[in-house]
Image: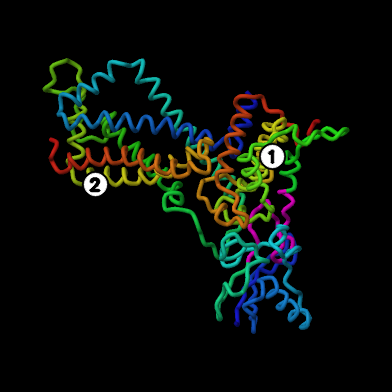
Amino acid sequence: MSWLLTFSRSTVGAKVIMALTGAAMFGFLIAHMAGNLLVFWGAAYHNHHALFLHQLPELIWPARIGLVLAIVAHIFSWLNLRARSAAARPIPYKVSKSRASTLYSKTMGYTGPIILIFLVVHLLQLTTGTLHPNYQFQSGGAIEADTPAAFENTVAILSQPLWGIFYILCNLLLGLHLFHGAYAMCRTLGLSGDRQQGVARALAAGVTATIVGGNVVIAAAILARVVN
Amino acid sequence: MNLTLNVWRQKGRTAAGAFEKYPVNDVSDHMSFLEMLDVLNEKLTAEGKDPVAFEHDCREGICGSCGFMIDGRPHGPMPRTTVCQLHMRSFKDGDELFLEPFRASAFPILKDLVVDRGAFDRIVQAGGYVSVNTGSAPEANSTPVPKTAADASFDNAACIACGACVAACPNGAAMLFTSAKVAHLNLLPQGEPERYERATNMVLQMDKEGFGHCSWHGECAEACPKGIPLASIARMNGEFTVANLLRSPHVSGGDGGG
């Protein structure tokens, strides 16, 4: 296993780990957004989707553990790389002008920690119910017993203007991170040749717009009481 | 035209440095940037002062000796240009410029604007070679090279190892340089036998020298006077990953066989 240690400690290997763990999180985000689109079909569909997932512990728990490991590996690789790059230029330039950096690429180190905070808040609100004013573990109107009240809990939070706006803003910041992240992922994994740069950019834009667009539409619809 | 230069002056590797202001008058549009510094240095020498140290050799943009930061950009404001090929017509009368050495912990400052780029030599020593059997000369057509591979290899071989990519990178990374050297040989059949050892050894040597990582800002490729494509880094990542995951790497520290 020494090769794995050497690989993960190298600047290229650590980026590959960030790309692969990022890809896993992209997969989750797409599934999470798609599942939540069921709010537009009403409480019965949304809650039944939650019940369906709860009844699959052999799917849910490996996914949860995998995602936590991915997040930890993503953060540790970043901390390792950031420390090395800070040491690579200890004295900053008096004058520095950029030619190619984008808003997205420059803010990765800030949007990442913001997303982590948002994730913790989100889990405390809608998974554990700790930060929720009236969290329900079971849906009152459901036909089947033990149906989670995913719909009621979500609407109770997002219909509050401050929380609704908070969720939308966090998703827009998530978009900044995802857009550069998806592009960098394609590049890091060596999938992007000269001609494929445009493809990588387009792919990143499409995936980001899908995830963020879906999430924002859900939050905005609940905030505007279109869904209640 | 008349200019004001703020030049980083530092006596030696461990000495403290600082900017010093120099007015330079009656600069011709036709001068190269280095010729303008020559004029300044003649004046400083006549006054009994220490001239500004900067590295230079061919002054044709092909040797890779020159290079420093001009107003926050390696080699100055013109794209695909080395400092020696940068002409004063790119500047305006009354401009105030900041001249700084390339800043990276792997490029220690020797004096003023001169840095030690020996780290690049050690990266090349780690894998930037091909092993050739001595003895009878091979038949000329025995190793056909596809035209596309030859072109891509040549594009990467254009790297003059000036260090502008490291200087421009917000992370102080040498990814573009190392990837150009890896791609230059890995794209050719002559480089095939040592392909994966090359990628592994050169990346590990790059890390050992203390360069940073790639965030895909793309600053390096924009600063490169030779237009090395950013895609070379994607290629190197692929080669390094395949070398590590699918094969057991032979980290030999640059001692090539053959």
Residue A97 is labelled as none
Residue A71, position in %: x, y?
Answer: 44, 33
How packed mark 1 is, by other alpha carbons closer than 10 Å (few <14, some 14-19, many 20 or more), is many
Q: Residue at x 71, y 44 (%)?
A: B123
Q: Is residue B13 left or right of A35 when viewed as pictured?
A: right
Question: Is residue B101 part of the magenta span, yes or no?
Answer: yes
Is the image coloured rainbow, by chain, by secondary structure, or in one colour?
rainbow
Q: Nearer the viewer, mark 2 or mark 1?
A: 1
From the image, which quarter does the N terminus of chain A lie in? top right
Same chain for mark 2 and mark 1? The answer is no
How packed mark 2 is, by other alpha carbons closer than 10 Å (few <14, some 14-19, many 20 or more), is some
Q: Is residue B257 left or right of A220 when viewed as pictured?
A: right
- Residue labelled with disc 1: B185
- Residue labelled with disc 2: A165
Q: Which residue is situated farthest in the right direction here?
A: B135
Residue A19, position in %: x, y?
Answer: 48, 35
The kind of residue on which mark 1 rests is: Leu
**Above-or-below relation of A93 to A77:** below
- In depth, the one of B146 and B2 nearer the eye is B146
> Which region of the structure is painted magenta?
B100-120
- Chain label for disc 1: B
The kind of residue on which mark 2 rests is: Ile
